[in-house]
Amino acid sequence: MNCLKAKIVRRLLLCMGLLSPAVTQALPLPEWLHVQATLTRAQVPACPKEQAEGLALTLNEGRIEGRLERLSLDLSCSRSGGGTAEGEGDALSLLLTLPAIDFHVDRLTLHLPKAVVTGAAELRHNEQYLEIVWHTNAGEARMELRPEQHGWRWQGELPGALIAPSLHHPLTLDGGWQPGKPLRLLAEGELPAPLTGAWQLQLAAVQGEHGWQLQPDSRLKVARLRWKQLELNRLELTPVGDVMLEGPWRARLSWQQGRWQQQALPGAALLLSGAGSDRRQGAVALELDRGLQLKGDWHYDRGLALTVPPQSLPATGVWQWLGGWLALPVGLAPEAGKLLLSLQATNLLDAGRPIAFEAELEEGRLSYRDMRAEQVAASFKLRWDKRGLRSVGLQALSAERFEVGVPITDIHAALNWRAGKPWLSGLTAKAFGGRLALAPMALTATPYGEVHLSDISLEQVLGYASVSGLTGNGRLHGRLPFSFEQGFSVTAGKAYSDNGWISYQAGESLLATGKSNLSLGLTLGLLSDLRYQRLEADISMAASGETIIDSHLRGLAPVMGKMHPVNFNYRHQENLLQLLASLRFAQELSERLPARLQGESE
């Protein structure tokens, strides 16, 4: 019945075509002439979604007016171009046979794969294409449809809010479909706030037995994305294999470098996946580097939530990855340890919602050149919000022992985040029976700061110097300003001690030489029992390890068998790094040699 009605209407429209505007110019019609043709319902059996209701053509006062109550079009199903079989005509092809007049449609519905657009519209016929103008609550939408090889080409502009409420900018569309070929769509627009950047969607989809599926050559591209203080360049989202529009899916999001504040960021990739009918949640995996991957979950429900539960990564791998794009302290590197990382974000798209980040280092071992810190542990809690990156609570760092050739133990430090940079709030350690402390300083690739010494045992220091016959007693205090640029160096260091003594008992050969050398004999006599009231030393060390110590002692020393006031100056120059290396070697040898002698393996 519907096909019969369509044929009757076609013949009626053919007759009315004689009354087209071109003909009325040649054959003037009386204004009182009024003709009307109507069609209650037309339907396309091959495309059940396509139908037209309440079609009316009216010749009124010399003008042809068109009206449709309802029109539904399915661009992925329509067959147009005049090559259809009997009974496979469609409503859209029917409209293309009409004279070049404007139609008003009370309700136009356009069916696309997984999307439907509906609203009042105007149809404007031209000889080669059909222009559709929607009047929606989000604004006016325009689309041009052209028949092409029994399919369609289209291009136009839509208000972004028609696709998603967060899209406030218009979208441009271009694409087409022919039977047996993938449906292709090119769309462009602006990212929703608080993101900024232009995006381009290149979509290819085919219809199979189980519905529509995206092809691997589909792409969502963003040349430059900005969010808060983050900038990522050349983002690309692609499906992993053929992805069904219904059911499980996987996609890969990659970017080529970026920037956070003033810091450059490396390229990386995210693997996204979803399962089941709810496509607003799924899993995510961040690929930092080969063998380095963080896994979590995402959920999109009035915002993009991201959860990365605590998981372990090798500290050596993370440090190597950081070294590929960050300027790290020269010579400093982890040798062992596990890094536990976690992240929590309730809504990444809301600039007012914070992002919580936690990291813990366990069983770490760090080295600087051939020096090593053992059993290093650290805990970091950070919060990123509209005020920037800040530390939350106590950020702790500790190490049982730092092997530098002399014993430095019980190391404890507190860290925080200031002005977008990590800061050392303070550090304490034990050495030579006394204490070491680091003043607060920024932790950069080339840090600089000051080490404070207190209650350092002079007896233990001289003991480690391993100079035969040299002993002493007293407590050293002072400060060592240092910098870390192409190596560790000390500039204008100061040390002092009050009320101690130093004794140097020379060997027989040196004593025999002193008997014939008055100056040497006097010096050896002073050093045999030098009781100082004040000891002061100026210390400097180059990055190569070359160290100069200028000492000045004021006190009492034996002269001709009696104690006399003396001022003693001494300048010592030595490569301290080489000395420490030799002390470390001696220490390691003393630990390994007994095992070797007993036939044990290391």
Image (spheres, rainbow, N blue to C red):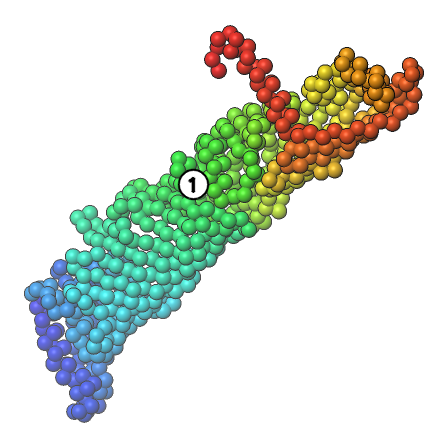
- Residue 540 lies left or right of residue 163; in this view the side is right
The image shows residue 284 at horizontal and vertical percentages of 38, 41
Residue 120, image quadrant: bottom left
Q: Is residue 384 left or right of residue 576?
A: left
Task: Kindly identify the residue that appears in the image at 59 percent across and 31 percent down.
Answer: 397
Q: Amino acid at mark 1?
A: Leu
- Residue 278 visible here: no
Residue at image position (67%, 36%) is: 542
Q: Nearer the viewer, residue 381 or 288?
A: 288
Tell which residue pokes out farthest to the front in this image: 516
Could you tell me residue 21's position as x and y percent?
A: 20, 85
Q: What crowding class fits label 1: few (fewer than 14 Cα within 10 Å), some (14-19), or many (20 or more)? A: some
Residue at 9% x, 71% y: name it: 7
Determine which quarter of the picture holds residue 490: top right
- Please name the residue shown 15% across and 65% down the image: 150
Give 590 or 12, whichever is nearer the viewer.
590
The picture places residue 298, in percent across and down from the top left corner, at: 40, 43
Q: Which residue is mark 1?
A: 288
Quadrant of the image containing the N terminus: bottom left
**Residue occupying the far top of the picture:** 598
**Left or right of 291, for residue 99:** left
Is 128 placed above or below 185 here? below
Q: Secondary structure at mark 1?
A: strand
Left or right of 340, for residue 27: left
Q: Using the image as rendered, state which of residue 57 and residue 337 is in the foreground.
A: 337
In the rendered image of this protein, does residue 64 appear above or below residue 208?
below
Q: Quadrant of residue 575?
A: top right
Query: Taking the image as drawn, is residue 490 in sight?
Result: yes
Image: 131 above or below 568: below
How many numbered marks are there? Answer: 1
